[in-house]
Image (cartoon, rainbow, N blue to C red):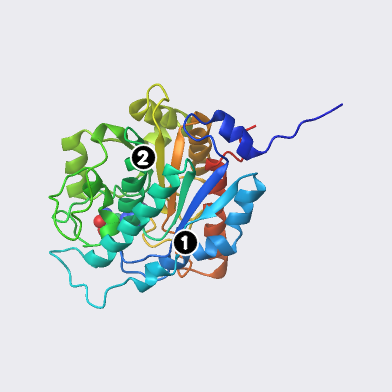
Amino acid sequence: MEYTIISDAQRMAERSKFIKTTVVGVTCVPFSGGQPKGGVDDGPIEMVRFGILDQIQDMGYSVELSEGMDKYRSMKPASDLPIGKMKNPRYVSMAARRVSDQVKAHCEQGRMAVTLGGDHSIAMGTLTGSSMVYKDMCVIWVDAHADINTPETTDSGNLHGCPLSFLLGLCKSEAPFDWIEPCLRADRLVYIGLRDVDPGEKAILRKHGIKAFSMHDVDKHGIGKVVEMALDHVNKDRSLPIHMSFDVDALDPSVAPATGTPVRGGLTFREGHYICEAVAETGCLVALDLVEVNPALGDPESLRQTVAVGCSLVRCSLGESLL
Ligand SMILES: NC(=[NH2+])NCCC[C@H](N)C(=O)O
Ligand SMILES: [Mn+2]
Ligand SMILES: [Mn+2]
């Protein structure tokens, strides 16, 4: 009997409607300026230390790593006074702009773009970058939070709670964020996992008719149905490219404790992985963010657990569990 072994990477390349290479373009973004807690900047380093790059290669992919990840720390301006309520606006803007260039470069080369954060403000960059190459892409935002505050509606002033308002063009184009072109349509965005949404954010979701599947919906329908409905909403024929932005705090804190804004009642280990598997299965995924892993929060075991689950979500999104 002869058996032909095909790598996960080859299998995904055959399945993929947009990516025909087996190259993954990884961008590590050690950045914490979008929120006040230190440590989230070490998230990507801990994931690399845990072996994520080798793990991706073991699946049969080759890895192209964006250069100069240390630069994200050194680009912090000496002075960065708040603008209105926004904290660290210049630093967040500069970092996101660089992320955008790096992600765009990977997409242009036909690579699957994987970005490891860092706090979620870096999605201003990841989505700007991918959308320049994939103009009609849709976004699946997996998160406990909606991250759609505007500079006016935010209470915290933390920009990791705001990236989507910039990308959707809900706030006026002003320095230092005037480089961001609105690149996302409200009907091409869908959320899964929400359970901590600010009043101003609820008003925005309602006004723009943005589809969200909260934990209530996951309980009610089950994760299988929710992912199907989410995909049907943004990508009816499974013909559009997908950028998935996965905030690890979408998972329950018992599964991913080391994160800055944990909210109880989140996705189980399997529900989180199911989302990644189902998205991989569409053959539409072109870019993935895995953000908000904060190794500084909690004991060593919480850290190990959170980093491990982050790596495993990335591998599943790259097709590890597809047969
Ligand atoms: N990416 C995150 N973890 N975001 C949390 C945001 C929390 C809150 N909605 C805020 O605007 O500050
Ligand atoms: Mn979150
Ligand atoms: Mn988030």
Residue reaching furthest right? Answer: 1
Q: Position of residue 312 (x, y in %)?
A: 57, 49
Residue reaching furthest bottom? Answer: 78
Residue toward you, 52 or 65: 65
Residue toward you, 218 or 244: 244
* Quadrant (top left, top right, bottom left, bottom right) of the N terminus: top right
Helix, strand or loop at mark 1: loop
Report crowding for label 1: few under 14, some 14 to 19, many 20 or more residues within 10 A (C-alpha).
few
Residue type, mark 2 in image: Val
Residue type, mark 1 in image: Glu
Q: Position of residue 169 (x, y in %)?
A: 18, 44
Q: Quadrant of residue 244?
A: top left
Q: CA distance from mark 1 to mark 2?
A: 20 Å
User: Does residue 62 appear in this view?
Assistant: yes
Label at residue 133: 2
N-term-proximal mark, 1 vs 2: 1
Label at residue 67: 1
Residue toward you, 294 or 196: 294
Q: What residue do we see at 61% from left, 41% from top?
A: 320
Label at residue 319: none
Q: Position of residue 310 (x, y in %)?
A: 52, 53
Report crowding for label 2: few under 14, some 14 to 19, many 20 or more residues within 10 A (C-alpha).
some
Q: What residue do we see at 57% from left, 65% from top?
A: 301
Q: Position of residue 9 (x, y in %)?
A: 61, 39
Helix, strand or loop at mark 2: helix
